[in-house]
Image (cartoon, rainbow, N blue to C red):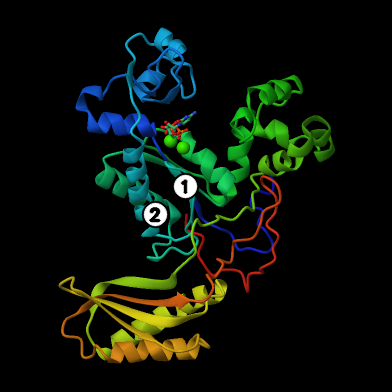
Amino acid sequence: MSKSVDHDPHHPPRKIIHIDMDAFFASVEQRDNPELRGKPVAVGGGSLRGVVAAASYEARVFGVRSAMPSVTAKRRCPDLIFVHHRFEVYREVSRQIREVFHRYTDLIEPLSLDEAYLDVTDDKLGVGSATGIAERIRQAIREETGLTASAGVSYNKFLAKIASDQNKPDGICVVRPHEGAAFVGALPARRFYGVGPKTAEKMARLGIHTGADLRGKELHFLREHFGKSAEYLHRASRGIDYRPVKPDRVRKSIGAERTYSNDLNTEVELREALDHIVDIVWERIEKNRGRGRTVTLKVKYSNFRQITRARSIDTCIAGKQQFAALGCELLAGVLPAPLGVRLLGLTLSALEGGPKPASETPAAGVLGPASGAIAEPKPTQHSFDF
Ligand code: DCP
Ligand code: CA
Ligand code: CA
């Protein structure tokens, strides 16, 4: 348990959240049909040859699981209620949760309709705490969809994904940087991604039952017994995973906004606040190698009325000074402020050629190191607040 935090030398430490909806299809059916609530429900094949797509937690008590033949499920749980899937509804919920994620970050990698990785190292609202963001997201999902989600929070994808499963349903699990090694060490080997029942059996024969057992094996030993998976197992058992979160779409803008606990009133206050936002946004622009032509200022007044002012130029903005100057100009256009200002935001858009987020480098193998082709300019100054 000596060294626990291993960082990709090419990247600063990350804050990753994995969100996964609980008993997704089954929960949607229970939400929309009160008669199904509190009861064992299986979504999918009621027919003799069908399989269960999703099982409600009430059905799981009886051992009903996804991908189980319906006949087996019915034998295990005679009162099991089968319902048809409604993909359009699941897709709609999926869109809703994606929209919630985007409030905090655009670095979102969906894995399926009901789950996604989020990189919140730089969150849009400046919350700072990944745990806080995960809790806000879970609450927003609950309020806006009527469904529960579980979250895993950690410094890489591998750990975040396992963590989201740890306290299901409706749970959260945070694995902080110094806790990674111990967390993985205590895991049953079968919880490692890619270790199915057969591999788990083989591991057991070799005396490997936990992450700690796995970690105790030399790489050549793992190669001998697990071939191509050896490198992955070797790294994962140490809690190492350098894969970046790969966003599903090209970023359209780069920006930041801040809400102030006390409204800003004077020109000096507003200019200072904007300077600070310029610093934050410009750092992001550099990191993402963003080049864009449009600067947009957003102002929300104490009465919650919001205005935006934008200015586009013919060529891409050349540097921070020009960016700051355009921001200032836009601010000058709304001065003097008719009311106190509770929020200020600044965004660069009309981006050229879809900038790549700095972290988007190909990974080698399942958990291979990122190529590191795009080097970070410097380590982050973030306090590592989980
Ligand atoms: N699904 C499916 N066939 C499978 C597995 C899953 O059709 N073999 C569908 C139904 C699930 C949804 O995908 O509701 C999400 O799958 P998950 O593995 O995330 O499982 P659940 O969301 O159902 O449950 P959990 O609370 O364990 O995440
Ligand atoms: Ca799920
Ligand atoms: Ca899932």
Residue occupying the point 52% across, 79% down: 291
Q: Earlier in the sequence, mark 1 or mark 2?
A: 2
Q: On the picture, is 31 further left or further right than 362? A: left
Query: Looking at the image, which is closer to me, 132 or 295?
Result: 295
The vertical placement of 56 against 337, above or below, is above
Query: Looking at the image, which is closer to me, 370 or 340?
Result: 370
**Distance from Cα at disc 1 to Cα at disc 2:** 9 Å
Please indicate, yes or no, whether residue 248 appears anywhere in the rendered image: yes
Quadrant of the rendered image containing residue 40: top left
Residue occupying the point 45% across, 86% down: 323
Q: On the picture, is 308 further left or further right than 50? A: left
Q: On the picture, is 289 further left or further right than 167? A: right
Residue 320 location (% of width, % of height): 50, 86
Residue 355 location (% of width, % of height): 54, 70
Please indicate, yes or no, whether residue 179 appears anywhere in the rendered image: no
Q: Secondary structure at mark 2?
A: helix
Question: What mark, if any, has residue 101 been given in the picture?
Answer: 2
The vertical placement of 262 against 99, above or below, is below
Q: Is mark 1 within 8 Å of ligand 3?
A: no
| Amino acid identity at mark 1 | Ala
Please name the residue that numbered disc 1 is placed on: 116
| Amino acid identity at mark 2 | Phe
Q: Quadrant of the N terminus?
A: top right
Quadrant of the rendered image containing residue 124: bottom left
Would you call the spot at circle 2 few (<14 residues within 10 Å), some (14-19), or many (20 or more)? many
The vertical placement of 302 against 271, above or below, is above
Residue occupying the point 33% across, 25% down: 84
CB within 8 Å, label 1 to label 2: yes
Residue occupying the point 42% across, 41% down: 114
